Image: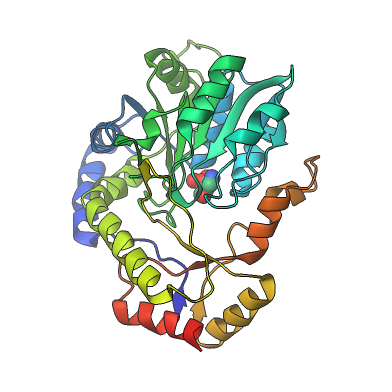
Amino acid sequence: MIPVTKPFLPPKEEVIQYLDEIWERNWFTNDGPLVKMLEDKLRRYLELEHLLFVSNGTIALQIALKALKIEGEVITTPFSYVATTSSIVWENCTPVFVDIDPETWNIDPVLIEKSITKETTAILATHVFGNPCDVDAIQNIANSHGLKVIYDSAHAFGSTYKDKPIMTYGDINAISFHATKLYHTVEGGAIVTNSLQLAKRMMYMRNFGHDGPGRFNGIGINGKNSEVHAAVGLVNLNYANEVLTKRRDNYDRYKSNLQGEMLTFQKINDVGTSNHSYMPVLFQNEKALNEILTELNDNNIFPRRYFYPSLDELDYVESGKMKVSQDISSRILCLPTFHDLTINQIDFICSFFKK
Ligand SMILES: *Cc1c(COP(=O)(O)O)cnc(C)c1O
């Protein structure tokens, strides 16, 4: 069986070394030494100013919205995972969808301005499949209208824009370290910002607002993560370069195999790089997609229709029809890509496209 992705398995012995330390200390959570070490190492690895390890990528988005005091309307993309939209609604804001670029599949900056109203306070965009958004264009619009910018960087570990880490752009970035992501801590995520003031505010928010045992600095929630998750993260970080290289190799192999097969690939930002954490291909129509999908499934290969459906279809959001996003959603398929997928397996998967 070849699944769409497989969690990277850190060598057990290396994790156990950290577990022994944890048992020795009898300290499982609440800003422990491994959490601090992981934050420090991630910050250096990703070249970031401030990074807070949290329990998942969704709480990272929610804390980001809360910390920036976002209210009213938030301009966002319909082509993302449901958490991008649901966290906006969860924080009592109104998502306003702006359609995506038909080639990059990221929010189309040209369309953003038209959707800005007196109620708009922020833009929440996703770096889809690790492809950097046009962050300069988005920032310019935000600056001229006094809007905050939050990025859902759940896919973007290791992606860059103008030779800088993608997560240095925008007011706050939310990352996911879920087991299915390129770099993971089993469950987990992080909030990233260049602002010390925001970092401090979010540090309180992550821990119930606690400022000492009986004191509180504003409202908070439980967004903490544990020493055990940090242990897995520390070991996985040693393999992050390897995993990133393998994803790129997989992408190159697929791309050269599938060239000329009536498929379209994602257009990667000219001034950026993608981490190629996914292997999306776009079919000419949904029928062609379904034919290949059935054939692959019959051969125990399980790609995933992702993102599908387009988020403007959610019944708890009012929205006009996002034509481009719905069209791309109906024709897109993410092919298997993970650290130990072999070249033979890639060639085998591609052979079904050639028939
Ligand atoms: C995975 C993902 C999330 C949610 O992250 P969790 O850590 O699972 O909460 C949010 N947005 C996108 C685009 C994702 O892929």
What colouring method underlies this structural image?
rainbow
Q: Is residue 119 above or below residue 98?
A: above
Across and down, in percent, residue 13 comes to 19, 59
Q: How many marks?
A: 0
Q: Is residue 245 above or below residue 224?
A: below
Across and down, in percent, residue 172 comes to 47, 27
Q: Residue drawn 49% across and 43% down?
A: 127
Q: Is residue 175 toward the left or the right of residue 91 in the image?
A: left
User: Along the line of sight, which residue is nearer the eye, 299 or 218?
Assistant: 299
Q: Is residue 40 toward the left or the right of residue 264 in the image?
A: left
Q: Residue drawn 41% across and 47% down?
A: 177
Q: Is residue 300 visible?
A: no
Q: Is residue 138 visible?
A: yes
- Which quarter of the rendered picture does the N terminus lie within? bottom left
User: Along the line of sight, which residue is nearer the eye, 53 or 194?
Assistant: 194
**Quarter of image, res 343:** bottom left
Q: Residue drawn 43% across and 45% down?
A: 269
Across and down, in percent, residue 118 comes to 74, 16
Q: Is residue 221 toward the left or the right of residue 7 in the image?
A: right
User: Along the line of sight, which residue is nearer the eye, 19 or 169?
Assistant: 169
User: Along the line of sight, which residue is nearer the eye, 295 or 261?
Assistant: 261
**Quarter of image, res 246:** bottom left
Q: Residue drawn 62% across and 70% down?
A: 284
Across and down, in percent, residue 168 comes to 37, 29
Q: Is residue 243 above or below residue 342?
A: above
